[in-house]
Image (cartoon, rainbow, N blue to C red):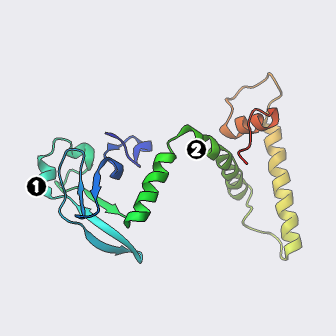
């Protein structure tokens, strides 16, 4: 058993990846060996999905029920599957995201997203004060420059660090030191 997609909040449980999907018989077998009845096709938001519902009786008798489903209403486990090719791609992508190499590549994007988030939330980048492309462009340039000035002012001089470094600061330091290589 491992943490599921909710695992970042500390909720243990079985994931879809822990279950065995039999695409031919249209059933799912949980890690405890319980097999679901054949699933039913559904359309959620106009997209094809498969709804897998384990029987209440089999889930009630299971000693892992509270850790598996998290519900106390004696309901059976409910799983939503995507069509087989898409589900397999999603499963493969989720497994890849747990590797160290993927997380290191994602660190650069994470730093970029943090910068965009800061300029939008703290400095109002999406709310333009001017009309026209040229004036809007000038505002964006000045906002970016202002963000850099604020970050530089908050950055203590060498040897006088009083707060722990953020992931973005470590990334910038790696890029300036040349210890980080680009994957291109």
- Residue 102, disc: 2
Compared to residue 62, the image places residue 132 above or below, namely: below
Horizontal placement of 13 versus 65: left or right? right
Compared to residue 120, the image places residue 95 above or below, namely: above
Q: Percent x, y for residue 132?
A: 85, 77
> Which of pointers 1 and 2 indicates the residue nearer the eye?
2
Q: Percent x, y for residue 145?
A: 85, 52
Between marks 1 and 2, how big is the CA–CA gap?
41 Å
Number of numbered discs: 2
Q: Quadrant of the N terminus?
A: top left
- Identify the secondary structure beneath mark 2: helix
Image point 83% across, 76% down: which residue?
A: 131
Q: Percent x, y for residue 98?
A: 49, 42
The residue closer to the viewer here, 25 or 50, is 25
Pointer 1 or 2: first along the chain: 1
Image point 28% across, 66% down: which residue?
A: 51
Residue ranking furthest to the front: 24
Q: Which residue is denoted by mark 1 in the rendering?
A: 57
Q: Percent x, y for residue 119?
A: 73, 55
Circle 1 crowding by C-alpha within 10 Å: few under 14, some 14–19, many from 20 = few
């Amino acid at each position: 058993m491992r943490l599921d997609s909710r695992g970042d909040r500390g909720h243990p449980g079985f994931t879809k990846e822990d279950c065995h999907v039999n695409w031919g018989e249209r059933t799912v077998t949980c890690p405890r060996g319980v097999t679901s009845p054949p699933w039913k096709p559904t359309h959620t938001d106009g997209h094809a999905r498969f709804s897998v519902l384990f029987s209440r009786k089999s889930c009630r008798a299971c000693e892992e029920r509270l850790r598996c489903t998290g519900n106390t209403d004696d309901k059976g486990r409910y799983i939503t599957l995507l069509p087989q090719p898409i589900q397999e791609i999603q499963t493969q992508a989720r497994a890849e995201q747990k590797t160290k190499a993927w997380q290191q590549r994602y660190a650069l994007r994470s730093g970029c997203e943090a910068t965009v988030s800061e300029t939008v939330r703290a400095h109002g980048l999406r709310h333009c004060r001017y009309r026209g492309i040229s004036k809007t462009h000038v505002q964006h340039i000045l906002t970016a420059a202002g963000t850099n000035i604020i970050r530089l002012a908050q950055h203590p001089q060498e040897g006088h660090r009083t707060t722990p470094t953020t992931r973005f600061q470590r990334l910038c330091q790696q890029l300036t030191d040349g210890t980080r290589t680009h994957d291109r």
